[in-house]
Structure formats: C-alpha cells, structure tokens
Amino acid sequence: MINASDIEALMGDEYYSEEEAPMSPSQYSHWVETMMLTTGQTRLVENTLGLVGEAGEVAEKIKKYFRDGSVDPTVIIKELGDVLFYVTALSAYFDADLQQVLDKNVEKLNSRKNRGKLQGNGDDR
Ligand SMILES: [Mg+2]
C-alpha cells in the first residue's frame, strides 16, 4: 500500500533542484501550455484520449499490484503525473487553470460534506 511516507520520500528535498522552486498549480498550467502540440478540436480529442489513456495506465499498475502483491510507488506517481498533465491541458482548453479546478473541487466537496452528501449519486447533489 502506498502511504504518505512513500509519497514524502518521493517528493522530498531532492525532488527539486536548488535552482528550481516547486511550481504552483497556476505555474504548472502555464508550463503545460508550453508542451501542447495540437490546437482546436484536435487538441480537445488528443487531450481527452490522453487523459483516459493515462488513467488506464494507473488502473493497469493497480491491477498488477493486486495480481503480483507489490508495486513501485514511483511508477504510480509518474502515471498520476501524466493524468494531471492531461487534466491541466483539458482545463486550459475550457479556459481554466489548475488552481481554478482545485478551488472548484474543494468548494464542491466541502459543500457535500457540510450537507452530509459525500455518499450518494448525482453530479449536483
Ligand atoms: Mg503514462
């Protein structure tokens, strides 16, 4: 099982070089834009299929964890980074940066929690 100490070990002091400060979500959004290779509808399709493909890669690694009984946490973290890349790219397509997506998600889930609606069905509960 991957726990907080595994992630901390991965993301520790040596994760970023001395010269390279950690990126904020908004800075990461700008950086992702520098990596885009497509535009318009082609970008929408490429980013959507990229997101689904990378989420599938996470699922594949978790499948192997259950099948084989172990997983290298660094492999999972790398795939989650790929998912984040496409989440960020899709967000920009719809004129939002990653910080805005994070803020909306926190707002939505806090509202559900405060109303006792974390469980259940429906996007607008
Ligand atoms: Mg990947």
Image (cartoon, rainbow, N blue to C red):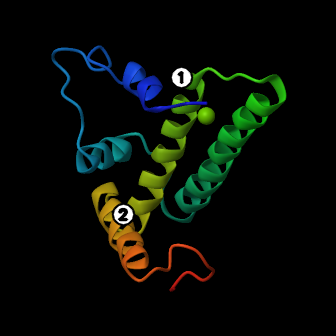
Real-space CA distance between mark 1 and mark 2, rounded to the nearest whole angstrom: 25 Å
Mark 1 vs mark 2: give the one in front.
1
Horizontal arrangement in the rendering, residue 121 relative to residue 7 (left or right): right
Tell me residue 64's x, y (percent): 78, 29
Horizontal arrangement in the rendering, residue 33 relative to residue 56 (left or right): left
36 or 86, nearer to the observer: 86
Q: Amino acid at mark 1?
A: Thr
Most extreme residue toward the front, as rendered?
116
* Residue in view at x 47 percent, y 46 percent: 84
* Residue in view at x 64 percent, y 47 percent: 55
Q: Amino acid at mark 2?
A: Val
Specify the label residue 74 is tagged with: 1
Q: Is residue 20 above or below residue 28?
A: above
Residue 71 in which image quadrant: top right
Q: Is residue 96 above or below residue 62?
A: below
1 and 2 marks in contact (CB < 8 Å):
no
* Residue in view at x 66 percent, y 52 percent: 52
Question: Where does label 2 land, which residue?
Answer: 101
Tell me residue 44's x, y (percent): 55, 61
* Observer able to see residue 28: yes
* Residue in view at x 40 percent, y 19 percent: 9
Q: Is residue 112 above or below residue 7?
A: below
Q: Is residue 101 above or below residue 11?
A: below
Q: Earlier in the sequence, mark 1 or mark 2?
A: 1
